[in-house]
Image: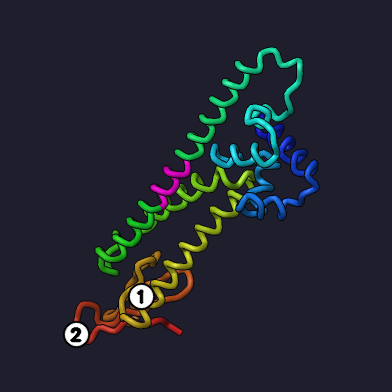
């Protein structure tokens, strides 16, 4: 099935009716972006919408799938149409499965992150380890989920980078709030060391701030960010 050819045919049908993408989108109850994806071949309408489009343009579904109007030379029209329909259906199922897998991985990743932050205390490194693991699942799930929707690889990469930065920012903000308001040590510290000049305190370093923990494990414990 040639999706680009189908998209070109859909564009020709729209122009025959002297319609803009916006006007057609309003007629079919979809977004302008959806019409654009159909006409560029980066995405295809589902079966239900295919029937509606065929009825609106007064063409047959086989004509849309073949990307051209019927001609007298189409001797194998029935067989070719059956093959095209089977391929179209297979493509729909494949795209649907990818979306489901992506959503499940994204949900599982978020579940791991939230569980790690709630179960493990801030002093434990397991909280950050499992949070990073959950982030990997979430980012991979996002990539799989958007792959059928975003045709350009560069845009998919930018989306993934955005997700990574969003998670990184969320972890940093959560550490800052934990220190400032709950007087807990940061989870996502990259090093913890003793201060030789002050043996009764620990120094926790993150990428953006340093945290001092005085008198750890005692009633007089203090945790604060070095200004």
Q: Nearer the viewer, residue 116 or 219?
A: 116
x and y, in percent, of residue 196 in the image: 33, 77
Q: Which residues are magenta?
A: 98-106
Q: In the picture provided, is 124 more to the left or to the right than 7?
A: left
Front residue of 214/2: it is 2
Does the image show residue 133?
A: no
Label 2 crowding class (10 Å Cα cut-off): few <14, some 14-19, many 20+? few
Residue 143 in view:
yes
Quadrant where the N terminus is found in the figure:
top right
Label 2, secondary structure: give it.
loop
**Is 89 on the left-hand or right-hand side of 225?**
right
Does residue 189 appear to the left or right of 27 in the view shown? left
Determine the residue positioned at 54% across, 32% down.
Answer: 91
Q: Residue furthest top?
A: 75
Predominant SS of the magenta segment? helix
The residue positioned 55% from the left and 59% from the top of the image is: 162
Q: Position of residue 37 (x, y in %)?
A: 66, 45
Relative to 69, does residue 124 appear above or below in the rendering? Answer: below
Image point (64%, 30%), residue name: 65
Q: Secondary structure at mark 1?
A: strand
- For disc 2, the marked residue is 219
- In which image quadrant can residue 211 be found? bottom left
The numbered mark, 1 or 2, whose residue comes first in the sequence reads 1
Q: Is residue 164 left or right of residue 183?
A: right
Does residue 105 show up magenta in the picture?
Answer: yes
Q: Position of residue 125 (x, y in %)?
A: 30, 62
Give the number of the mark in front: 1 or 2. 2
The residue at 59%/49% (across/down) is: 156
Residue 78 among magenta residues = no
Which image quadrant is residue 74 in? top right
Label 1, on which residue? 203
Q: Characterize the local packing of mark 1: few (<14), some (14-19) or many (20 or more) Cα atoms within 10 angstroms.
A: many
């Amino acid at each position: 099935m040639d999706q680009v050819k189908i998209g070109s045919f859909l564009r020709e049908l729209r122009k025959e009716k002297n319609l803009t993408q916006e006007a057609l989108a309003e007629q079919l109850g979809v977004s302008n972006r959806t019409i654009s994806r159909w006409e560029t071949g980066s995405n295809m309408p589902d079966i239900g919408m295919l029937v509606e489009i065929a009825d609106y343009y007064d063409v047959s579904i086989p004509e849309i799938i073949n990307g051209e109007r019927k001609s007298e030379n189409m001797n194998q029209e029935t067989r070719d149409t059956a093959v095209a329909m089977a391929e179209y259906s297979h493509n729909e199922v494949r795209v649907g499965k990818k979306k489901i897998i992506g959503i499940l991985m994204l949900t599982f990743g978020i579940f791991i992150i939230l569980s790690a932050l709630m179960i493990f205390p801030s002093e434990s490194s397991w909280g950050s380890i499992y949070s990073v693991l959950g982030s990997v699942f979430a980012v991979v799930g996002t990539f799989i989920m958007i792959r059928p929707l975003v045709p350009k690889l560069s845009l998919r990469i930018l989306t993934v980078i955005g997700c990574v930065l969003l998670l990184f920012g969320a972890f940093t903000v959560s550490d800052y709030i934990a220190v400032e308001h709950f007087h807990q040590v940061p989870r996502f510290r990259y090093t913890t060391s003793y201060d030789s000049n002050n043996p009764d305190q620990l120094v926790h370093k993150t990428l953006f701030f340093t945290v001092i923990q005085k008198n750890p494990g005692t009633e007089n414990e203090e945790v604060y960010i070095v200004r």
